[in-house]
Image: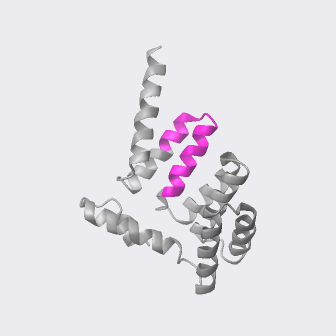
Amino acid sequence: MPVVGRCLSDGDRAVRLIASDGIHGLWTRSGSPSQCHRLQQLARLNACGQYEEVIEGCSALLEENAGFAEAWHQRAVAIGSHIGSVAALKDFLSALECDSFHFTSAVAVAECYRELEDSSTALGYFQRALAIYPDQEFARIQVALLERADGERLDR
């Protein structure tokens, strides 16, 4: 994964796009074949809003393989949708700890901190997401907004 992860910030945009597509596939294949199949099913359930089932299924997967970053991420998405994004923060951080290139988790962590009104930490995680994958337009916009808000606060 580190080779593909490093390509996310390559100078060539085509390489970055290929790496982005590739790493998404790797994220769902970081476990045994059975675990990967279950995670793919859970991701589909997540997309359908069956959050309790996803939380339960990902929890079981994580008992088997605590290093499965995408299982942490999928559980966090379900928790965030079912309970609230702040409740999902720990799982998003765990996904990022398991895979330092998991830029979607970095963005999600930033969103959680923004909801907690900790704009400084949110800014840091948005910047981290951009350092991992510079083509993240959402993160780029959020960095600009947070920096502008911070500048306006300092001007007062």
- Write down the quadrant of residue 155 in the picture: top left
Relative to 1, is 89 on the left or the right?
Answer: right
Query: Residue at the location (38% across, 56% down)?
Result: 133
Depicted 70 relative to depicted 79: above or below: below
Residue 148 vs 33, above or below: the answer is above
Q: Going 36% across and 62% down the picture, which residue do you hit? A: 8
The magenta segment: 104-124
What colour-coding does the image apply?
one colour
In the rendered image, residue 128, in percent from the top left (x then y), is placed at 45, 50
Image quadrant where residue 7 sits: bottom left
The kind of secondary structure the magenta stretch mainly shows is helix
Which quadrant holds the N terminus? bottom left
Residue 98 pos. (x, y %) = 56, 66
Residue 132 painted magenta: no
Whether the magenta-drawn stretch holds residue 115 is answered as yes
Name the residue furthest front: 48
The answer to whether residue 16 is left or right of residue 29 is: left
Q: Which residue shows up at 66% across the image and 62% down it?
A: 75
**Furthest-bottom residue in this view:** 33
Q: Where is residue 49 shown, x and y percent of the image?
A: 67, 60
